[in-house]
């Protein structure tokens, strides 16, 4: 076998030859996307992965001038590995050669191979080359236009009396991006969803998003005007967008906060609009003030005292029917605050405080489970987060308080016990009256409230060809929840074994089971909560049998049971074939899948390839066939075309979907095209 140093040197030669690599777009990314989709994340949010990696290919991270926030964007690096890197650089100075990465504790060869396409060593400061001429000649821009639609007519597009979709079934997205090195960026995004009008009065386009950003200029580390995201600590106090949470890579439960970042997603929900910056005060101390004002969608209602109240904010961003259009921009949201952070090699900590104010008051009137939900129109949140590396253990945690409301606590530890064994433990305790509009911490529920839990995860590699990942998560809900009329508890277990005898062959076996409690169904004789059980068994094989072709096969079984009812048994079988020649203008992939699950409750998720910046994980349920075909064609050096055709075929159905999304027939198919011009 080739020595590790020679293998690494060979990979560096390949990189310098500009051979395209997809080191990080492997099983780890696909596993994370499937986990995110199971938690209800939107396709547009999931597409951030591909865009982020594409950016770092063109603008690699300079390891000698980087900060922890930059390396946190490389999802294959754990917080412990990032801490080890900065400790090594602090003790040994700047890296002279990328081969030095092998000398860093906790950096194995697999990790190094994954990050190499996205890192570099550049001694010159990019500001030394900054002038008006270079802003044009040495910058990069791209324009991307995406079009898609369902080919079958949905009920909402028929000429119906009453509720119907007001626009066309076409989906459009136009995005422009400008980037000069890692110093300046600008973006503009326009989007229309299916069912919305293209020109709908004011504003003309349904969703417009954009920003201008300046980085690393004297004491200004970041300055963003426009739309942005805030991600600090472990997500208890302030985190907009999505976070990874539980997945087969157990280290993903430790959130890697990126701080202030530009917002480029087409998702119309969780982001801020205004101005924000990160300024270096002195030494390793920085502050991040921010101000945001935007309109939000909400359904308002008249309260018994004659006041106007609301219960939830609509995050979908859909404005298709008269009701959705009526609810558009009905509530004003103003958010302002400050984050103060100390960032050292071994110890980092931060304090934050911010206030959210709404033009109408939230109400918790209604079902009993909403008793401790937030009410009022102003909410203040305070938080403290930290991380500390002691030898081979990475400690991290966060404490959050809402005013009015209660507290939330999260404490974790990640340890590299040996080169082949690592472990993660996380304890969480979220009060039932802890309120937060911008929280995304680890938990079984979607909100950081009314939950206690303990998580233990292990990564074990007994041999370079084998990797075992196991986690156990116990959770408890002290107060009522939706469809759960008393205190409840449950647990989740995942075990995954991956065998990689060669770089061309990989076999994965996974077991996952979830045990929860829920109210009995209507008509049941049970008077207390009944157990809810869902178990998945998966076997998958990835095989590159030719330099131009690789295949993927998966078999997955699911068992779902509620109370004393008979268990639902379902399965999914699919075959993927990928064609990716290194020098050809044409590449693509195809899937053929057969699935049979009794209901939506026993659905199975599977990652699906898509056009650029479009990615998701389909939910397979019912009985039918699923197939799709993707292709990419390089029209010119700077002009690329992507296309996708996909369909579901349900032989036993005459109607697909429900409500205004109902389709008459046995097939549901969609078409997508994307054009990207880079200059």
Image (cartoon, grey):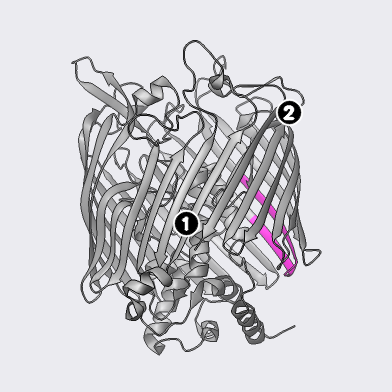
Could you classify mark 1 by the number of other residues whose Cα lies within 10 Å: few (under 14), some (14-19), or many (20 or more)?
Answer: many
User: From the image, which quarter does the N terminus lie in?
Assistant: bottom right
Q: Is residue 652 above or below residue 594?
A: above
Question: Residue sitting at 44 percent across and 46 percent down?
Answer: 443
Residue 278 included in the magenta stretch of the image: no
Horizontal side of residue 6 vs 339, given as left or right: right
Horizontal side of residue 491 vs 308, given as left or right: right
Question: Residue sitting at 74 percent across and 46 percent down?
Answer: 591
Q: Nearer the viewer, residue 403 or 36?
A: 36
Q: Which residues are magenta?
A: 496-513
Q: Nearer the viewer, residue 50 or 424?
A: 50
The residue that disc 1 covers is 253
Outermost residue to the right: 545
State how far apart marks 1 and 2 are (Cα).
38 Å
The secondary structure making up most of the magenta span is strand
Q: Answer with the quarter of the image where residue 380 lies.
A: top left
Q: Earlier in the sequence, mark 1 or mark 2?
A: 1
The residue that disc 2 covers is 650
* Residue 488 shows in the view: yes
Residue 372 percent location from the top left of the image = 29, 32
Q: Nearer the viewer, residue 577 or 235?
A: 577
Outermost residue to the top: 161
Of the two numbered discs 1 and 2 in the rendering, the one whose residue sits closer to the viewer: 2
Residue 19 percent location from the top left of the image = 64, 73
Residue 501 included in the magenta stretch of the image: yes
Could you classify mark 2 by the number of other residues whose Cα lies within 10 Å: few (under 14), some (14-19), or many (20 or more)?
Answer: some
Q: Nearer the viewer, residue 418 or 91?
A: 91
Q: Is residue 4 above or below residue 149?
A: below
Query: SS class of the residue under badge 1?
Result: helix
Question: Residue sitting at 75 percent across and 41 percent down?
Answer: 593
* Residue 620 shows in the view: no
């Amino acid at each position: 076998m080739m020595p590790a140093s020679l293998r690494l040197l060979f990979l560096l030669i390949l990189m310098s030859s500009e051979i395209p690599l997809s080191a990080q777009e492997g099983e780890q990314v696909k596993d994370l996307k499937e986990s995110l989709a199971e938690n209800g994340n939107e396709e547009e949010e999931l597409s951030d992965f591909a865009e982020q990696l594409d950016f770092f290919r063109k603008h690699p991270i300079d390891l000698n001038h980087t900060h922890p926030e930059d390396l946190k964007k490389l999802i294959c690096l754990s917080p412990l590995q990032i801490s080890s890197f900065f400790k090594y650089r602090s003790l040994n100075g700047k890296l002279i050669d990328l081969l030095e990465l092998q000398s860093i504790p906790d950096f194995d060869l697999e990790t190094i191979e994954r990050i190499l396409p996205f890192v570099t060593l550049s001694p010159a400061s990019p500001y030394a080359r900054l002038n008006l001429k270079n802003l044009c000649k040495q910058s990069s821009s791209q324009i991307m236009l995406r079009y898609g639609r369902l080919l079958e007519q949905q009920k909402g597009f028929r000429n119906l009396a009453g509720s119907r979709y007001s626009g066309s079934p076409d989906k459009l997205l136009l995005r422009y991006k400008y980037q000069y090195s890692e110093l300046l960026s600008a973006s503009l995004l326009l989007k229309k969803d299916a069912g919305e009008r293209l020109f709908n009065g004011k504003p003309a386009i349904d969703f417009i998003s954009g920003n201008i950003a300046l980085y690393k200029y004297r004491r200004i580390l970041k300055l963003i005007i426009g739309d942005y995201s805030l991600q600090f600590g472990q997500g208890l106090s302030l985190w907009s967008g999505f976070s990874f949470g539980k997945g087969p890579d157990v280290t993903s439960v430790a959130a890697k906060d990126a701080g202030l970042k530009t917002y480029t997603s087409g998702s119309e929900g969780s982001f801020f609009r205004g101005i924000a910056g990160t300024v270096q005060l002195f030494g390793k101390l920085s502050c991040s003030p921010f101000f945001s004002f935007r309109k939000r969608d909400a359904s308002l209602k008249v309260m018994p005292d004659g006041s106007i109240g609301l219960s939830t904010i609509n995050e979908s961003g859909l404005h298709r029917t008269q009701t959705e259009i009526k609810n558009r921009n009905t509530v004003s949201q103003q958010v302002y605050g400050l984050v103060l952070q100390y960032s050292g090699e071994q110890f980092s900590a931060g304090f934050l405080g911010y206030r959210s104010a709404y033009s109408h008051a939230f109400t918790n009137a209604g079902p009993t489970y909403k008793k401790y939900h937030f009410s009022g129109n102003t909410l203040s949140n305070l938080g403290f987060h930290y991380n500390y590396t002691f030898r081979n253990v990475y400690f991290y945690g966060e404490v959050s308080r809402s005013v009015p409301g209660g507290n939330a606590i999260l404490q974790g530890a990640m340890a590299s016990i040996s080169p082949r064994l690592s472990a993660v433990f996380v304890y969480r305790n979220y009060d039932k009256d802890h309120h937060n509009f911008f929280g995304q911490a680890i938990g079984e529920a979607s909100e950081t409230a009314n939950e206690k839990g303990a998580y233990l995860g292990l990564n074990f590699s007994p041999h370079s060809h084998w990797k075992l990942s196991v986690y156990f998560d116990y959770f408890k809900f002290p107060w009522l929840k939706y469809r759960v009329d008393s205190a409840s508890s449950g647990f989740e277990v995942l075990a995954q074994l991956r065998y990689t005898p060669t770089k061309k062959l990989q076999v994965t076996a996974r077991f996952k089971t979830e045990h929860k409690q829920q109210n009995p169904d209507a008509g049941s004789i049970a008077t207390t909560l009944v157990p809810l059980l869902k178990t998945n068994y998966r076997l998958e094989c990835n095989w590159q049998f030719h330099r131009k072709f690789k295949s993927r096969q998966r078999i997955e079984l699911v068992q779902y049971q509620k109370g004393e009812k008979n268990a639902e048994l379902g399965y999914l079988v699919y075959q993927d074939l990928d064609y990716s020649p290194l020098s050809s203008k044409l590449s693509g992939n195809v899937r053929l899948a057969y699935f049979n699950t009794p209901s939506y409750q026993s659905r199975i998720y599977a990652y699906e390839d898509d056009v650029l910046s479009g990615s998701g994980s389909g939910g397979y349920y019912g009985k039918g066939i699923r197939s799709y075909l993707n292709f990419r064609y390089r029209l010119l050096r700077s002009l690329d075309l992507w296309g996708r055709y996909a369909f579901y075929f349900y032989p036993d159905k005459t109607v697909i979907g429900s409500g205004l999304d109902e389709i008459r027939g046995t097939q549901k198919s969609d078409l997508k095209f994307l054009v990207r011009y880079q200059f």
